[in-house]
Image (cartoon, grey):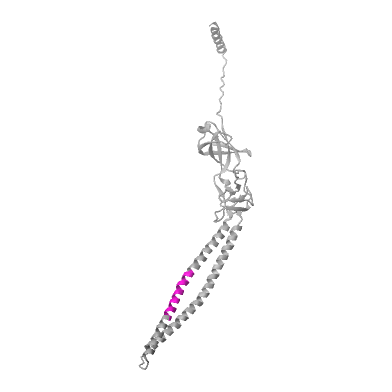
Amino acid sequence: MLMNKTKIILTSFLLSQIIGCGSEVTVTTEVTKPASLTATGVLVSKESATVSPPSVSSMWQYKIQYLVKENTLVKKGDTVVRFDPMQLRNDLMSKQSQLDAAVKQKEQSELNQTQILQDLKLARAEAKMNRDKEKRKAEIVDASRSGIEKEKQAKQYEIAQAIFAQAEQRLQSYYTSTSINEEVSDATINRLTIDVDRIKSEISLLNVKASKAGIVMYVTEQDGEKPAIGESIWQGRRILTIPSLDKIAVQAEFDEPDTTKVNVGDDVKVTLDAYPEMPFVGKITSLGQSYKTKSYRNPKVIFDVFIDIENINPEIMRPGMKVKVEMAGGQS
């Protein structure tokens, strides 16, 4: 108890001494700035075209015959991939041969049918002439002719009529069969023509052109391999992408605890790992709709943040480049 009283008296004495001396007391308060948030990310393109093997009937594997070099700047319409057309060329030769044969067969058939038609018309004309002649004979009234002769003449007329009817029937059958044969022949030629035109079109599809301007980036497989000339690939595989360099943005990864500190519209500083001396200004445009683990080996929970960059520099910026994103803490 005595000790406490002594402390109180000593403190009072010191205060009185300070006040009595009239000295000014300056109190310094240290203000701590809120810590900035940092995250890592990569450059991405908001507009990109993907190149895969074209859809070609009867082809499931495609051998790469030509492949534009990676990181090449291409214009719309430039050839980026060409696949080996050997299989289609063989199919084209086969179909073209069948088409040529079908056309020649039709031409030869038309020549033959022309001769047959002339013969049938001539036979009909002769049969008609004989029928008319026998008819006139049968209609002659001659009392001197015997009944046997009249009956014989009537039979001759009936035979002539039958022959004419047969000639007429053969001519009509010719027209019917010729019409059917022409339809079958035309259908065969049309089908083969369609096949030939389709194969020619598919051969042109094997010469894949860029659908837009941009930079060529190969698509890496899970085993780390990239496409190469001479390689055979399956239909549906992504070979390369052509991102636009004037549509570059940032896809950053922020930690889950920073969720409430990151908002759409916040300004950030973007620094490229390859060019740390050239920071850029960016603005958060959207947040990922879900959380995920950073990687198989790193269980840290993160979420994506998408950032637009002001004053994009296409000369140095490339999709896939690593960046550092920094924003002032407490912006929320």
Q: In the image, is 215 to the left or to the right of 119?
A: right
- From what the image shows, is residue 229 above or below residue 141? above
For the point 46% across and 72% down, the residue is 177
State the image coordinates of residue 60 (x, y, percent, origin top left).
Answer: 57, 53
Would residue 200 be found to the left or right of residue 167 on screen? right
Q: In the image, is residue 212 part of the stretch drawn in magenta?
A: no
Residue 160, placed above or below residue 206: below
Residue 116 seen anywhere in this rendered image of the structure: yes
| Near-viewer residue (219 or 194) | 194
**Rendered residue at 58%/63% (across/down):** 94
Majority secondary structure of magenta residues:
helix
Answer whether residue 165 is magenta in the image. Answer: yes
Q: Is residue 80 visible?
A: no
At 56% from the left and 65% from the top, the residue drawn is: 98
Q: Position of residue 312 (x, y in %)?
A: 58, 43
In the displayed structure, would residue 1 be above or below residue 85?
above
> Which residue of the protein is positioned furthest toward the front in this rendering?
148
User: In the orientation shown, which residue stands out farthest toward the bottom?
Assistant: 144
Closer-to-camera residue (128/70): 128
Q: Position of residue 294 (x, y in %)?
A: 56, 36
Query: x%, y% of residue 112?
Result: 52, 75
Magenta segment boundaries in residue numbering:
163-182
